[in-house]
Image (cartoon, helix red, strand yellow):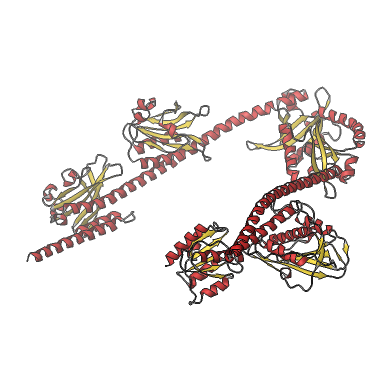
Amino acid sequence: MQATAATSSDSATIAGLSAQLQSLRRVALAVAHPGGPGLFDALVRELAEALAVPTVFIAVFSDDVCSLMQTLAVRLDGKTLRNFDYVLQGTPCAHVVGREFRYMARGVAAEFPRGSLFAAKGMDAYAAFPLRDSQGEALGLLVAMDRVPIAGGNAEHAEAMLKIVAGRAAAEIERTRTDGALRSAALAVSGARNDTVFDELVRLLATILHVEVAFIARRAADEPSQLTMLAMQYDGQVLHDIRYAIAGTPCENVLGQQFRAYPNDLQALFPDDEEAKTQGAVSYAGYPLLALDGTPLGVVSVASRRPLMQVDRVESMLKIFAMRAAAEVERLAASEALQQSEASYRAIFETAEDAIFVHDWDSDRILDVNTKACETYGYTHEELTRLTVADVSSGVPPYTTEDALRWLELAKQGHCPSFEWQRRNKDGSLHWDEVRLKPVSFNGRRYILGFAHDITERRERERALQRSEARLRATVEAAFDCVIGMDAEGRIVEFNAAAERVFGYRREAVLGRPVAEVIVPERRREAHRRWIREFPITGSSPMLGRLVESTALTASGEEIPVELAVSVAEAPEGNIFVGHVRDISARREAEAARLALEAQLRQAQKMEAIGQLTGGIAHDFNNILTSVIGYLVLGEERAEGIGDTVLLRQLGQAHLAAQRARDLIAQMLAFARRQRGEARVLDVAPLVRQTLRLLRATLPSSVTLGGNAGVDDLASPLCVAVDPVQLEQVLFNLCINARDALDGAGRISVDLRAHAHERWQCASCRAPVDGGPWVELSVADNGSGIAPELLERIFDPFFSTKAPGSGSGMGLAMVHGIVHGHGGHLRVRTAPGTGSVFSVMLPRAAAAPAPCSETAPQRAAVAEAPALRGSVLVVEDDPMVGDFLVERLASWGLRVRLQREPQTAADWLAEPAHEADLLVTDQTMPHMTGLQLAARARALRPTLPVVLVSGNAGGFDPQELARCGVHALLRKPIDAERLRAVLREALGAAG
């Protein structure tokens, strides 16, 4: 029974909570209404439904003294009623407006006046929530009433519901009032008259915002840190022309910046603002006045003796007033500027250095002249305005009255250039003017302005210059160097006979043309034009007063080196630049040849130094190898004496490896010019095979080395008389060049054959060569080939197509020298994209060859004591490294399977019967990399650990290694202890 009662109680509680949640959800949807007409009706309707009450209404103050209320929406018994007014006092609403939420479960009917609608309808329960704006000011209230306790007597639920709706209603009321105020302000501002606009604006602003002080101030023109009041509303009076400094006032933070508001404690914030103290202001707001280009003009501000409320509304109002005030301030400034401009123009007119005449458009009569005209012509102002153009002209054609009238007519048509005019002064003397005529309009009338500049002295200088020009001409024409004159605009005014010979132009063809277009190379023309433009300003140039080397263009377009000296001379028509130019082509060629020889000498000295260093290192290694080889021989003898064949074989392999090192040192000594051999007749095939084995170490595994020179079964000996060391050097150089041409991957073929054909031409010395008999040693690659334009230079010393520091440019030059020193020649067959074939052609010898030993080096490693167990697959294409790894791993107790081809290893792993606990693979191998093999192994045997060996252990992506199943990465040369530790760990993980 008790359990049943508890269950019923819980169900009732859950049902009540569910009903409350549904009510809250309904109210939340109602307040999400976008606003505008119908919002208040929607709010009261949804709140009535949510609380299940018959009566809900929203009411606000309808008068300034807050005694009369007006409803905005009324809901009663499911119907929307017409809005009405009621007196606040004597109603339960008086205890809510401006205060707090009120809830009465019963008894509210007694608080309504007799005859009240709500009392008549039996409304006895009451819940009301006050409405406030964003500043906390009272707006009205939201009321819900019922005949029974609202929300079943749950006051908290009723308060929550009313609070949500009240917040939305208050926001809408405030928005509506703000919009109305802004519209009223905008209409008032737009209707203000221009002559009293500032007075009207401050009166309107003070009235709308209910403040005691409103003013519009303009930035003082003579003191930017001060403002001048254009109009100030102060306690009902409008004041003008009050000037004050803005330092320490709130206006300082507004001028030229942005809206600022200080709602309270103004005097505490700005203790130095004496005006604020005088006014008793406690709040302030200001908006900057800005010109269209952003220039600060002034401020529009308000201040009050009360705290400032609704700052956002104040900002909106000030912004509207600021736009109109800024426009009026700009208009006022433009009017003042016009007045100042007219005064300035008159001052300019009277103080101008040229004589200025103002002619009537229709009659051509002289209406006005400036002081300079009176001084120049010798007349008074009154006399000149009574004269005609004929009275001040010489009267000698083409300076007659008819000519003057023709110039005036052209000016009226807008086609009158400047011209020279001969005038007659009051004393009868004749003088020269340069005249410019210009049509103008002023105050709706048209005039012709005449500007006359006295050029009498200039004309006299020109005549003197013409007399001296003949004398100068003879001197210039006799000069050995080119003499080129240039005016201030960069045009050629002089071009002597030497210049004609050097540049190939006739004097008449270049006079008047810009120097930049005639002899200045295009890449320097802009710089030339720039210093021509800047010289009148700076009065200097890096070219003046110096002897410099440059280049110039001839008529044929050839660019030649020249020696240039430029001087400047003053002339009546402006500066004249005189350039003395000397062709130094022959001198430059001699200097270039000398510099080339010096560069070759420096390169040769550098190569010699490198050779000396290489020789020194090789010498030290030879000393070390001498002791190493000696001890190896002793060890071999001792091993043979005790019958230890394993040790004997291992020491023998080490001995052979040391012999290879010795042979490499021999190559270094040959490069360093420390070791020379005598030319002797020998079969070249064994020597080439031995050299190729040594060369293999310098080539990456991605480069395949082939051809018949590496095999043992040539049909017959190919004998030549040669220094074997030098022939090795030739073969090394050609193969290294072929390797570089492959760009990391490809094939090099080295072939030997007898050659006897038709006559041919040597590729390096260009000499014709007989058909034979010759021994041809060829090195071919399938690289990029050689461009035809480079073939003529590939055997030149120091010529290289490689990047700086990547080659000396001496490789093929050395090949040329050695081959021709042995009586041989060279052939080259190449084309871009098809590879190259370099053939060394040596005369074939008939004598029996001297023996040339070959050593096939092999290598093994010293085994450690066995301590590991398991089966390991080793994949290594290098025989010595592979054999070493087999012996090394076997010595540790491992079962080892060696594969030299990665594809073969992959096929072996594909057989399930083949046992393998670990894969050890090299990275760089032909046809397939170690990482690719690891990926194949991962696919075939997912649990097989892989150890990858590479000379570049830092060049891998760890994620890629993990994806391919690589357990560890080792760097060559392999450290034995590290290798053993990795194997132990990998085999342990696999087990």
Q: Is residue 522 visible?
A: no
Relative to 689, is 270 on the left or the right? Answer: left
| Residue 321 image position (x, y, % from top left) | 43, 39
Instruction: Give the quarter of the figure containing the N terminus.
Output: bottom left
Relative to 951, is 813 on the left or the right? Answer: right
Q: Is residue 768 above or below residue 360?
A: below
Residue 132 or residue 237, whichever sits in front: 132
| Residue 424 image position (x, y, % from top left) | 82, 27
Instruction: Give the quarter of the figure containing the C terminus.
Output: bottom left
Relative to 924, is 987 on the left or the right? Answer: left
| Residue 339 image position (x, y, % from top left) | 58, 31
Residue 479 or residue 939, whichever sits in front: 939
Q: Residue at x 74, y 22 (%)?
A: 380
| Residue 517 image position (x, y, % from top left) | 79, 45
Residue 840 is drawn in which quadrant? bottom right
Q: Residue at x 83, y 33 (%)?
A: 399
Q: Is residue 646 visible?
A: yes
Residue 698 or residue 332, whichever sits in front: 698
Q: Is residue 610 above or below residue 784?
A: above
Residue 532 is drawn in which quadrant? top right
Residue 959 or residue 427, whichever sits in front: 959
Q: How many marks?
A: 0
The residue lying furthest to the front in this view is: 641
